[in-house]
Amino acid sequence: ALARAFPKNFVWGAATAAYQIEGATQEDGREPSIWDMFAAIPGKVHQGDNGAIANNHYHLMQEDVELMSRLGLGGYRFSIAWPRIIPQGRGAVNAAGLDFYDRLVDTLLTKGITPFATLYHWDLPLALHQEGGWTNRDTAYAYADYAEIVARRLGDRVAGWMTLNEPWCSAYLGYGIGIHAPGEQDLQQAIDAGHHLLLAHGLALPRLRANSAPNASVGISLNFTPIYPADERAETLRDAERADLFVNRWFIEPLARGQYPGGLFAALEVEPPPVQAGDLELIGAPIDFLGVNNYTRDVVRGGTTPARADESIKVGPVPGACYTEMGWEIYPQALTDLLIRLHREYGMQALYIMENGAAFKDSWDGGDQVHDPRRVAYMQEYIGALASALEQGAPVRGYFVWSLMDNFEWAEGYAKRFGIVYVDYQTQRRIIKDSGLWYSALLEAWRANTVL
Ligand code: FCB
């Protein structure tokens, strides 16, 4: 009955990101991004892996779209590599870069797959990093110019734009604790970078709209990790609130309400970012949809003194709970709760799950099957949680599994496999996992209006 819970115009898809799958980092005029630089620093990425070859999707694009078509996907979420389009970050446009995504979009459309494009999934041109990257306000203006250039080329065919993917990660993991590129470790820089990322989004919105088809929609994808208190003690409720402020409210509130949540900067013991007149109006302008990335939840327990908002005590393992290979608890109810909250509390009128999925230790024996029963169960449970959010009125329009295929998992390198398709990196062979077959059968049942 799962398939029946979803309306006919629901978009079922899969997601990827440029640096995680494309490879060909030195081809056709692409210049380095902060991830090429970061991955080259010993110790930053598991086993020294990098995206230089990745899934070689830049060369295998046609086959990969063919694979999506075999899976029966209705949508595909990919990201566009800024360093392919404007290799120095600003200035000269590289025609070969635009051509690649133009071909991708046309190939998708030929197969009846709706393109959803993310304009920034973490691969900042290195030249801009040398001028301060996201801590420099000018980067936001360079981004808006880049976004317009892409929209002028693809805006007649892309159905949904995401300005940014998970700016929380770009800001905090990249500038606050340095586990992602560019690897800075300064919470104040993270706050400032976060503001410039939001400004980039706000500046790009009208320029994307002006250069896209009238029915195209423009949004952003944010990561959310719902926070649950471990007990009912006042200090637990206090620290859970502070964790929520930092993890979930930092970005959604300026976007949905045009202001940073009260107490955020104090709770992080930093100064407010350098907000200029008019910034928050741009940032708070209405979006057509919110992209929701959710994998797990956190359970927080209060300490004797209030924890700094980014340092609350997370408890785990939760007795009886299951965890993925990332160490993330499987807790589908959090997705239901989150979607209802985004609708009720933040007035979001259109939600897409732009990422949801799980890493497990998959193995391939050289045959044509890969058994991943735990991923099948994960997807079944999370899509069930999604159906329950829909029933309770959450306006969910689509679901994109992370990921179409195993890929370069940032600091975790190739060791963590999230795909519903297995990738043998030696041969670049793709093998549909049982989860891919299951997903495909779900989509088929939904199309045919039958019971899975
Ligand atoms: C998200 C990223 C995505 C992928 C998943 C596992 O934070 O947006 O690229 O790495 O996590």
Image (cartoon, rainbow, N blue to C red):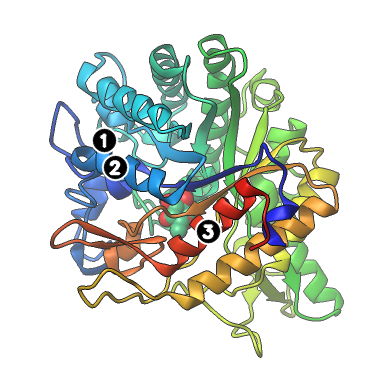
**How far is mark 1 from mark 2, CA to CA?**
5 Å
- Say which residue label 3 marks: 441
Assign a secondary structure to mark 2: helix
- Placement of 189 over or under 128, stated as above or below: below
- Placement of 20 over or under 153, stated as above or below: below
Q: Quadrant of residue 142?
A: top left
* Number of residues whose C-alpha sits closer than 10 Å to that of mark 3, classed few (under 14), some (14–19) or many (20 or more): some
Q: In which quarter of the image is the C terminus?
A: bottom right
Q: Position of residue 8 (x, y in %)?
A: 69, 40
- Placement of 207 over or under 55, stated as above or below: above
Q: Which of the two discs, 3 and 2, labels the residue nearer the N terminus?
A: 2
Q: Where is residue 18 in the image (x, y as percent from the top left)?
A: 33, 41
- Say which residue label 1 marks: 126
Q: Is residue 391 left or right of residue 196?
A: right
Q: Is residue 291 left or right of residue 253?
A: left
Residue sitting nearer the eye, 162 or 352:
352
Q: Is residue 234 left or right of residue 101?
A: right
Of badges 3 and 2, the one in the foreground is 3
Image marks 1 and 2: residues in contact by CB distance under 8 Å: yes
Residue sitting nearer the eye, 289 or 76:
76
Residue under the point 51% across and 10% down:
211
Residue under the point 21% across and 45% down:
23
Going by the numbered disc 2, the residue's amino acid type is Ile
Assign a secondary structure to mark 3: helix
Q: Is mark 1 within 8 Å of ligand 1?
A: no
Q: Which of the two discs, 3 and 1, labels the residue nearer the N terminus?
A: 1
Going by the numbered disc 1, the residue's amino acid type is Leu
